[in-house]
Amino acid sequence: MDKKKTKVKILASSHPQFDEIIDLPPEGIEYEVDRVKTKYHGWITEKKIDLHNKILKILPIPRMTSTKTNGDIVHSTRGIIQIFQKKPWIIDCECGSVFTSFNWKAMKNPIVRKIIMHALKSKNCKKILPQSNAAKEDLRKKIGNKNFEKIKHKVEVLYLAMRPNKEKKIKRKDKKIILSFVGIHGFYGKGTHDLLKTYEKLTKKYNNLELKMKCDEFPEKYKKYKKLPGLKVFTKYLPKKELFKKLYLESDVFVLPTMKDHYGVVLLEAMSAGLPLIGTNSFTLPELIKDGKNGFLIKTRYSWEMYPDNYTQEKIKEDFEQKHPKIINQLIEKISILIENKKLREKMGKESRKMIEDENGQFSIKKRNRQLKKIYEECLNSSTN
């Protein structure tokens, strides 16, 4: 006779990170899925975030709901706090201001903080799960040390995980070096313009390069870069299988010079395809890219979390849209190392895959599931005591 499964109601968006939880649950866990059907970061999602930010100016309320379920536990996500929740619940957060749709100034509002803290301190809120150490420290910063001390016994970092891609890297016989980049919804924030300038300079140094980019349409002043030799740009939607085939599995190096990401799930995808990584030291990226081991880190002072709270979004946008020669020079240096050293490329690519594939790999499904199962069990046990 089968052991009774623990039923968990999980709130999920269409983001691919939730495929890795819903499709591959911990042993003994059965998910009841409440999933947003709209395209992730599509028009509807962006408008909902904009609407929440407008509401915050008039009525200071964080993201919140009261989830109904016959399950045993509620797994709330994306900083959506539970109110009037009688079931034990846990919540994940990708950064400290996720509770207010990434409006960090709203987190200073005493009413907003009071609502959030009331929920997080409640007896039925059992665990608060930052998705990285960077997210944990940002949570501390956004709610303040005094408030963090009141809930720190509930806080536990739970990294996102990724299954290894079943199809391994395509072995090409050509002499090309193919770079790949996936960065949508933020041409400048993702560092797309810096990478284009980097690639332009690299093509004058090497004649065997290609750059495959999945991104938004270029701003007018950058459309001229589409004529660069070996550049292939994909702006239309690509299903996951096609994305892997065209952007990851044929590539030699994955590059993401982002300034705006909270996590960078595309890096996990590149790791699952066995690619060496090059990215900035922005927020969570240093926890995914072990400098010199599975890739290289590029130093930037323009990452979103490095700005003080009194900076306006307009000023940050202006900084993002600048050309960043120091970043470009670092990108040229690190990409050149990997272009010229095939053994290092392969070694770093194997390290990336190992972090996903090994049972104890930092971003492996098995490690994540062991930790998550334990969290659910502790959540239930503390409710019955």
Image: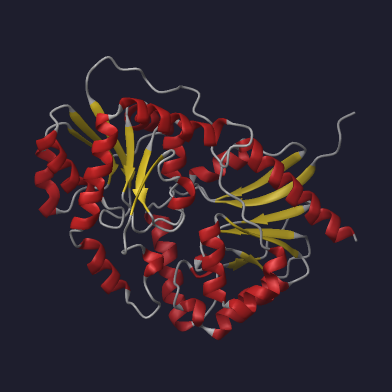
Q: Is residue 147 visible?
A: yes
Screen quadrant of the N terminus: top right
What residue is at 16 percent from the left and 31 percent from the top? Answer: 230
Q: Where residue 278 sits: x, y (%)? A: 34, 43
The residue most toward the top is: 173
Closest to the observer: 383 or 30? 383
Left or right relative to 62: residue 384: right
Answer whether residue 274 is visible to the viewer in this image. no
Q: As drawn, is 49 to the left or to the right of 177? A: right
Relative depth, front residue between 189 and 32: 189
Which quarter of the picture shows residue 320? bottom left
Q: Residue at x 44, y 22 (%)?
A: 168
User: As drawn, which residue projects farthest toward the bottom?
Assistant: 110
How many marks do you count on the picture? 0
Position of 29 compared to 38: left or right? right
Q: Image point 41% across, 75% down: which residue? A: 54
- Where is residue 97 shown, x and y percent of the image? 50, 68
Pinpoint residue 154: horizontal percent, then vertical percent.
71, 64
Q: Quadrant of the C terminus?
A: bottom right
Q: Decide which of 304, 328 is in the foreground and name it.
A: 328
Quadrant for residue 200, please give it: top left
Q: Identify the residue at image location x=49%, y=28%.
A: 165
State the colouring used for the structure image: secondary structure
Task: Report x, y in % for residue 205.
Answer: 12, 35
Eyeballing the image, is 322 above or below 252?
below
